[in-house]
Amino acid sequence: QKTLKPSIFDIREKHMMKLPILFLLSTASCGNAFMLSSTPTRPAFTLSMTSSKEESKDAKLLERREMFQTVAAATASAGALTSLFPQIALAEEGASSTKQSVVVAGATGQTGRRILERLAATPNLVVTGGVRNVEKATKALSESSTVVRGAMVQSVGSVDTSGVTLKHLDVVEDSVDAITSTLSGSDSLIIATGFVPGNPLKMQSAAHAVDNVGTIRLIDAAKAAGVKKVVMVSSILTNGRNWGQADSPGFVITNAFGKVLDEKLVAENYLRGSGLDWTIVRPGGLKAKPPEGPLKISAEDTLNSGEISRDLVADVCVAALTDKQASNKVLEIIEDEGKPPKVFNGLNM
């Protein structure tokens, strides 16, 4: 069997936009955070050193080729996205490209549908959306709407699912064997599931069922199905208790919803010990609107506030599937808006 060589990054500057798409965590100091600013044609990348205790006053300009390359957005004539996003292209050395397969669990959620949209527009990729009800999901993904889910109001755009296969996947009701069957034949998995706050009396049990037990069930199924890479969407402050943030406003506010951060941490730790290649993406407060500032990626347990567009979260998740520098790492991400970050609320829409 020939070795697959990742070729994620292919710059086509004519598609560059002013807002950044991706940074990749380097293998340097675990206190590093990356902040990107770009121009339409000659993007420049600034590396700032930050930690939970201090932020360096010095910034070091890096050559863009040393940092990363981004991929081009597909052309409008091809009916693809209008925004730039990283694409996956795994090419076999000395041979034609080989299709890879990825499953998105939680494909109808606000972040999951954005991930699905980007993957669906990616060449040489077989995309499956894991959903609880295929019929309802087909309709929901094809429509733009504003819906109320539990305690949250969600405004969502339509998604072209013509290149996507939707399959039943319920992390609460399905057995590991059933989920294994759904994941069978897939190379990678993106976990974008999360409980939806609703009845205050049932929030803790719901968070436990989805963000803890259900996610662990997904990880077990991924191993059984032979999945090689798992990207998990989590949250900043998930490990807040262990780095002095238990009384911080962000931790207190977010964990009040069913102790969701505590539940996520259990699943995170399980994934770390699974033996799989993993990346844990911890976004700040999630916004449905487009990005307003450059993307900042920091090391684990360094960010306790800040917000980020779900669009950027989706971009990072897609790129993390194939970028070796994201292998077995935690990426904490927010938008740098040039002002002190807002108090984190992981359920902010």
Image (spheres, rainbow, N blue to C red):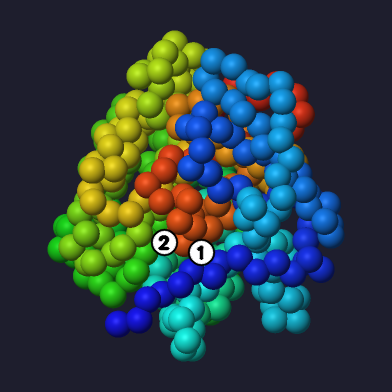
On the image, the x and y values in percent for residue 267 come to 28, 40
Residue type beneath disc 1: Leu
CA distance separating discs 2 and 1: 7 Å
On the image, the x and y values in percent for residue 81 come to 68, 68
Secondary structure of the residue carrying numbered label 1: helix
Secondary structure of the residue carrying numbered label 2: strand
Pick the residue in front: 39 or 308: 39
> Which residue is most to the top?
247
Quadrant including the C terminus:
top right
Pick the residue in front: 236 or 59: 59
Q: Earlier in the sequence, mark 2 or mark 1?
A: 2
Residue type beneath disc 2: Val
On the image, the x and y values in percent for residue 241 come to 36, 18
Q: Would residue 18 be found to the left or right of residue 342 on screen? A: right
Neighbor class of circle 1 (other Cα within 10 Å; few <14, some 14-19, many 20+) is many
Question: Residue placed at 28% from the left, 37% from the top?
Answer: 269
On the image, the x and y values in percent for residue 43 come to 78, 52
From the image, tell me which residue sits under label 2: 104
Looking at the image, residue 103 lies above or below residue 28: below
Quadrant including the N terminus:
bottom left
Q: Would residue 243 be found to the left or right of residue 182 on screen? A: right
Question: Residue placed at 59% from the left, 17% from the top?
Answer: 54
Q: Are marks 2 and 1 in contact (CB under 8 Å)?
A: yes
Neighbor class of circle 2 (other Cα within 10 Å; few <14, some 14-19, many 20+) is many
From the image, tell me which residue sits under label 1: 116
Residue 202 visible in this rendered orientation of the protein: no
Q: Quadrant of residue 166?
A: bottom left
Residue 76 visible in this rendered orientation of the protein: yes
Pick the residue in front: 2 or 267: 2
Question: Residue placed at 41% from the left, 35% from the top?
Answer: 198
Q: Quadrant of residue 33?
A: top right
